[in-house]
Image (spheres, helix red, strand yellow):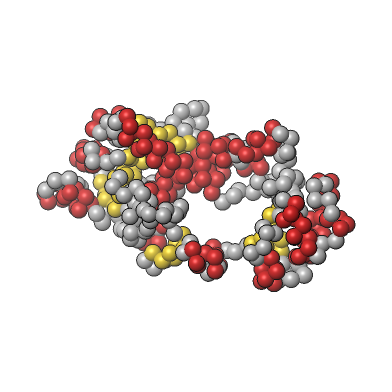
Amino acid sequence: MGPLHGYRIIELAGIGPGPFCGMMLADLGAEVISVERLGAKAPKAELDCSRRGKRSIALNLKSNAGVEALLKLVESADALIEGFRPGVTEKLGLGPDDCLARNPKLIYGRMTGWGQFGPLSNAAGHDINYISLTGALNAVGRAGEKPVPPLNLVGDFGGGGMFLALGVVSGLLEAQKSGKGQVVDAAMTDGSAVLMSMFHTMHAMGLHSLERGTNKLDGGAHFYDSYETRDGKYISIGSIEPQFYAQLRSVAGLPDDPFADQGNKARWPEMKQAIAEVFLQKTRDEWCQLMEGTDICFAPVLDFQEAQDHPHNVERKTYVQVGDMMQPAPAPRFSRTEPEVRHPARSYGTDTQSVFAELGYSVEQIEALAN
């Protein structure tokens, strides 16, 4: 059982970062009850990683009976998370005031792109927009080229879902001392801004330029980048420290000219071209034989299916079989309260009867919720 065993979290079902947050809380042992829209369909639900380990109920939250049923469930919960635009749950009668009136210790977690207030708070948006506003997108890409979206990892999941999970767990810890609940306003703009903290620091110290693709960590340096190999695959190098760079030079056979002066930024483009030609001389597997496991700071660039078979990931059980699908395992690891995926994603509404029976609802009352 994971470290959050014994906590009950209600998740008002949505897409992206909210369900991702719920997945992490469920992986860590919390009982997460996903509240789906009555009548909604879930094609191939068993393949949705973000729904694993959760119980699923279906309610009509536009009906008085559905709202009352959810508020009854709130009374037995430790936290609730939702990802609607500001004001939506208030209109349903399920806003923070409504829920905290039923359960004063409740942590009410809110996940939005722009936050609960501000000029953009009610505008539509997606990950790419949120990270644009905080400087994160502008920093990713090659010199002289347009910014490259880093999938939706930085806004939705790193700056969104993970910050919501941190906020909920922090709120639960504080409530144990104060006996009081509170609202967590998790905005992807706020979270992605925090993720950029290191680059604010480096820029203030004169170590990072606002011109993307010219810096140590954004592909500007020849010793921190990915390179194509002879078989059309790729490897990654992160030889930042001088001793690691020296080992890279030794194993790759890089000559003194131009590679002796690692920090000479004026020659980085020249060195990048030269090292790219070196890496094209061998296949990815051949470079792995020479460099993997050394202090060069090396790894093959794998797709996520290849990653499942890498010996390091296999030994650590970084991926686990859940139902018919191999998925990333819960993280982080704990020495005593080991997280686990208790079951695959369930069809919408699978647990409606059992959840409300536990709350004392009669068969007739549960059947009425289906309308």
Give how far across and how far down residue 324 sits, in percent.
39, 68
Give how far across and how far down residue 275 sits, in percent.
79, 60
Classify residue 271 by image quadrant. Answer: bottom right
Front-most of residues 310 and 63:
310
**Would residue 93 be seen by someone viewing this image from the given angle?**
no
Give how far across and how far down residue 188 sits, in percent.
50, 39
Classify residue 1 by image quadrant. Answer: bottom left
- Residue drawn at x 78%, y 60% is 249
Q: Is residue 267 above or below residue 131?
A: below
Q: Is residue 323 above or below residue 168?
A: below
**Would residue 151 be seen by someone viewing this image from the given angle?**
yes
- 135 relative position to 274: left or right: left
Q: Is residue 32 above or below residue 300?
A: above
- Residue drawn at x 33%, y 40% is 80
Direction right: furthest residue = 257
- 81 relative position to 160: left or right: left
Front-most of residues 317 and 188:
317
Front-most of residues 289 and 345:
289
- 182 relative position to 251: left or right: left
The count of marks equals 0
Q: Is residue 210 above or below residue 3?
A: above
- Residue drawn at x 36%, y 33% is 174
Give how far across and how far down residue 220 sits, in percent.
74, 49
- Residue drawn at x 60%, y 39% is 196
